[in-house]
Amino acid sequence: MSNTVQSNTKMASAFLFIHAQTSLHPGCGTALGTVDLPIQRQRHTGWPTIAGSALKGILRDAYREMRKSHYGNNRKKANEEDANLVAIFGPGKVEESSAHAGALSVTDARILAYPVRSLRGVFAWVTCPAVLYGLVRDLGLSGMSQADLPLPAGLTNVGRNQALVPTKSPLLVGGNKIVLEEFDFQVVGDCNRLADWLAQQSFLADDSFTPQRMQKHLVVLHDDDFGHFVRHATEVMARIALDYERKTVKSGALFHQEFLPPETLFYTVLLAYESRQEEKKKETAQQEEQQQPTRKLSAQEILKQVADCLAQTKYLQIGGDETTGKGLCAVRVYSG
């Protein structure tokens, strides 16, 4: 984890790519339309997002699961007493919540590529210039080299009903057109290098199939075309509760829930700072065994702790309906 923000050794950064393996419901808790349980969306774009506060809680839970074996598999004890966990995420005890802040900041996750049904090649991952320019900006925010992201040469010239598609993509119809949902798009250039970069950085290292698919199935659309798909091509499922005696729907128990489809790709920025809690000395043999730190952790050490945890965990459950298999996501840390 050698990357820093503005060459400041008290801050380190990395990207966390989130690849949905099953349908995903990062719920917002309110309904203003016909969908009772919609997903979280940015207010100004209507594009899907995942709140940073939710992601930080999920990361804390993953780290706690990794550390609980040092405390007799007691999750509560690990959450409150593990010094590294408290340094990274903040105190676990309510009465100590104002003692210091955690050393890890997690931004809201942004949509990076969205799966859309295709006439050829099953589905495509679609993205757009606004998404890619946001990615460039976040690379700069993180202190990483913006030049590392190979943007397509014709990116600014992509118009409505036009697309950039990898050369010899199986999505092509007649050699110069693709059809997504009920819309056809004229191919006006390629995005080969961008597709290669996303394939190399976004997916688990031991996943050989998905990167190969990304290299051939990435599509860059106009911002408005992309916006249409992420607003209107989600999964909306009707949910019911049954009256077991009559085997009919209970009164008022029918509702509709929105999901993001499997293969949706997000990213979030992890910003780590030097740990903020007071230094503690090892006073007992138990503390020695549990590897309590005797000094403050640097920003780089904080980020490495999180990255090592995620490398070991590989998958996180994000959003609702865990017991029905929803929200299973593969995660990978990218640090430039």
Image: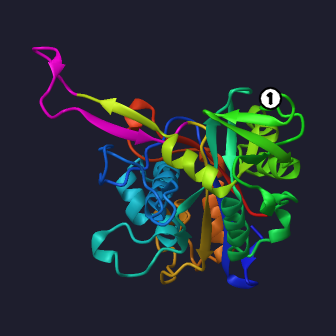
Q: Is residue 18 magenta?
A: no
In the image, residue 300 lies at what x, y percent? 69, 72
Give SS at disc 1: loop
Looking at the rendering, in which quadrant would you find the N terminus? bottom right
Reply above or below: 6 against 156.
below
Q: Nearer the viewer, residue 110 or 270?
A: 110
Q: Quadrant of residue 141?
A: bottom right
Question: In the rendered structure, which segment of residues is drawn in magenta?
Answer: 241-261
Please count the marks in the image: 1
Give the left or right position of residue 256, taking residue 223 as reference.
left
Which residue is found at the position 80% from the left and 29% from the top? 173
The figure's colour scheme reads rainbow
Q: Is residue 70 shown left or right of residue 134?
A: left
Residue 179 seen from this side: yes
Residue 205 percent location from the top left of the image: 76, 43
Q: Quadrant of the C terminus?
A: bottom right
Residue at 66 percent of width and 60 percent of height: 131
Side of 331 relative to 206 (left or right)? left
Q: Would you place residue 281 above or below residue 34 in this image? A: below
Q: Nearer the viewer, residue 9 or 67?
A: 9
- Residue beneath disc 1: 173
- Extreme residue toward the top, this view: 246
User: Is residue 6 left or right of 24 when viewed as pictured?
Assistant: right
Q: Which three-letter amino acid code belongs to the residue tagged 1?
A: Val
- x and y percentages locating residue 229 in the rendered image: 57, 45
Q: In the rendered view, tell whether residue 196 sits above or below residue 283.
A: above
Residue nearest the observer in this picture, 46 or 264 = 46
The crowding category of the residue bearing disc 1, from other C-alpha atoms within 10 Å (few below 14, some 14 to 19, many at least 20), is some
Q: Is residue 242 magenta?
A: yes
